[in-house]
Amino acid sequence: MLFNVQRDTLLKPLQTVTGIVEKRHTLPILANVLIEGSGNRLNFIATDLEIQIHTTVELEQSLDDFQLTVAARKLLDICRALPDVPLSLESSDSRLSLKSGKSKFALQTLPAADFPQLAQSSESKCSFSLPQAILKERISLVQFAMAQQDIRYYLNGLLLSLEGNVLNLVATDGHRLSLASTMLAQNYDKTEVILPRKTVQELAKLLGDQGDVKVDIGANQVRFEFGNIVLSSKIVDGKFPDYNRVIPARQDKFFNISRTSLQQALQRAAILSNEKFKGVRLVLTTNSLGIICNNNEQEEAHEELEIPYSGGPLDIGFNVSYLLDVLANLSVDEVACSFGDASSSAMIMVPGQDDFKYVVMPMRI
């Protein structure tokens, strides 16, 4: 007998680590989770050779020391399908037996000695802490702007830029850029690392609303420690674009508008946008914002919103999806929009705050 445990005690750590387990893998053991028992602790570790997640559960009973690896998704699916009742696990002859009431499952195991754990970086450039809720919110404000399978591989991740007491998170796909900042308790030397897309997605899922997260940046690795979870990730080797050059410096056309009103008007107009290019025209005149979409069938949608605007007229085109993305990920009542001319990037911000900027390039329609 390895141990007895309630279903949820096993299910929660499996849900934590299994997210990074690939369905397709080059090494069969990468489909497995490493389970270690020592004292009254159970350790769960999963890796894809780029990212590693380690979580710990404390039990009321004391365990004999053991190590085994078993198919992560199969064990997770079994636990999900069972009711929340006591489970018993036994291991013998390269098999893990799981019993719950009259249900019995036998899973193949692989030697724990063959499990490829990430080597922990011994050199640390800097370490800092901040509330989990803040980092989670900042990630949500930028991760949607990351590129997907771009040949410029460094754009498929998220830039973590530390300078002084400011932490900037930046993502761009070359057509739009999202930047979210937060203040830290002390000053640090300038440090920049690019987090892989998968690391960002796992952090967005795992970070909670209580407690702090400790971030430790090494030479080729970054480590996030929060609650009973440690997420270690390799760093993307590349040069991120200078995001400060992308942010418009001078814009003379600006207005505030209800986020929900703008979002709903864009969603309605987008129904008749060209399916391939998703273009939308924004037409600014005194106290009015026109939103126009049309398609190859000569169909057209026209929305008009009243806004407090007294600047010059402007007719500018954008990919409507880029505008809807930012509005969906903000939770504020109003957004501030600023423009230059028809060939200049536009910027969306939160009124009265300078810790978020979203820049989107125009398109010809």
Image (cartoon, rainbow, N blue to C red):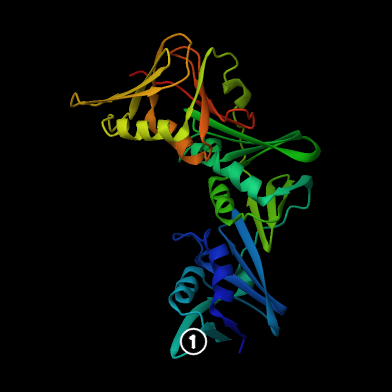
Q: Which residue is mark 1?
A: 100
Please provide percent x and percent y for residue 235.
64, 45
332 relative to 3 in the view: left or right = left
Q: Indicate the quadrant where residue 39 lies.
A: bottom right
**Mark 1 crowdedness (10 Å alpha carbons): few <14, some 14-19, many ≥20:** some
The quarter in which the C terminus is drawn is: top left
Q: Amino acid at mark 1?
A: Ser
In front of the other: 85 or 240: 85
Please, what secondary structure does the residue beneath circle 1 have? strand
123 sits left or right of 56 in the view = right
x 54%, y 12%: residue: 252
Position in image of residue 73 (x %, y %) = 47, 68
Q: In the figure, 138 relative to 201: above or below?
A: above
- The residue at 45%/87% (across/down) is 104
Residue at image location 68% in from the left, 53% down from the top: 224
Image vertical order of residue 48 relative to residue 340, above or below: below
